[in-house]
Image (spheres, grey):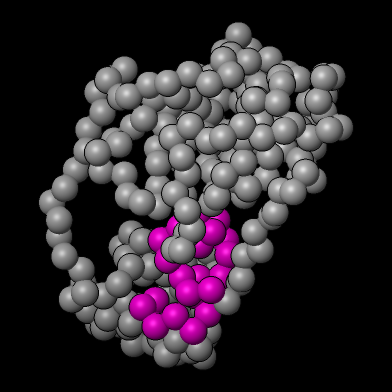
Amino acid sequence: MHGAKLMQWNPAARVRIEFHSLLGAPAGLGDMSVGTQLREVRQKAKLSLRDLSKKSAISISKLSKVENGIATLRHPELIKLAEVLTIPAAVLLSDPPANQKLSGRRAVTLAESGPKFTRSDRDYEVLCGEMSGDASLFWRVIVREKAPGNEVSYLSHPGEEFVFVLKGKVAVHTNSYAPLVLSTGDSLLFDAQSLHAYFAITREAVLLMTNVVRDGGQRPELVPAPVRAPAARRGRKTAPR
């Protein structure tokens, strides 16, 4: 709608540490880093393929294919292997240690100390902005705006957007799905090129938000340009489902 172009994710894409992999997408068809890491960790643990297969309930054939970069790991398999090998799951998704350099960098944002701006009755605070890479941004967002909002309520920008509700209840409106109500502790990941807006159901809602852009994408602007709201929802209330 209104020119919003939805990104199509290629399930055969090379695996990286990103939300798609962690939420159940194939972990790297043909990707050598996963297999290399798995073999290295397995050998350090002094486990044969047969041993690992028995402990993880994943076939020897599947494990061998993964180590040779010709098979995929699904999210439950990745978590099970990490559990069996007693390592963080991210270890299997990262480059081999020889290719990594420890930067020693870190960023700290004390309460209420991040750069702030307000847009359409939503207060944004940038978190750890001095260390955010070109592909990621982190925010604390306080939402007070009520549905149906207006044209500036809706945003569209490259990449994926992840939100976790820290407090309150919020309705997420997009032009791709029916309105979704999220309560404290709920989370959502979606294609941010869809027109989207947040409306508070309670007096206000507090969100932890992350914007992630894959390689080759454009970094989201700190204040995205306004876009027109979906016609079907402009000027009237949409009952949350």
Residue 26 colored magenta?
yes
User: Along the line of sight, which residue is nearer the eye, 125 or 63?
Assistant: 125
Residue 32 colored magenta?
yes
Viewer can see residue 180: no
Residue 91 placement (x, y as % from top left): 32, 65
Residue 115 placement (x, y as % from top left): 32, 24
Lateral position of residue 158 relative to residue 235, left or right: left
Residue 205 lies, with reference to residue 193, above or below; the image says above
Residue 240 placement (x, y as % from top left): 78, 26
User: Along the line of sight, which residue is nearer the eye, 189 or 153?
Assistant: 153
Q: Quadrant of the C terminus?
A: top right
Tell me where residue 26 sits by quadrant.
bottom right
Tell me where residue 231 sits by quadrant.
top right
Magenta-highlighted stretch: main secondary structure? loop
Q: How many marks?
A: 0
Residue 135 lies, with reference to residue 55, above or below; the image says above
Part of the protein shown in magenta: 13-34
Q: Residue at x 38, y 68 (%)?
A: 93
**Residue found at the very far top of the displayed protein:** 203
Residue 237 lies, with reference to residue 229, above or below; the image says above
Viewer can see residue 101: yes
Q: Residue at x 21, y 74 (%)?
A: 99
User: Along the line of sight, which residue is nearer the eye, 220 or 104?
Assistant: 220
Q: Residue at x 49, y 84 (%)?
A: 30
Residue 3 placement (x, y as % from top left): 74, 49
Q: Residue at x 60, y 9 (%)?
A: 203
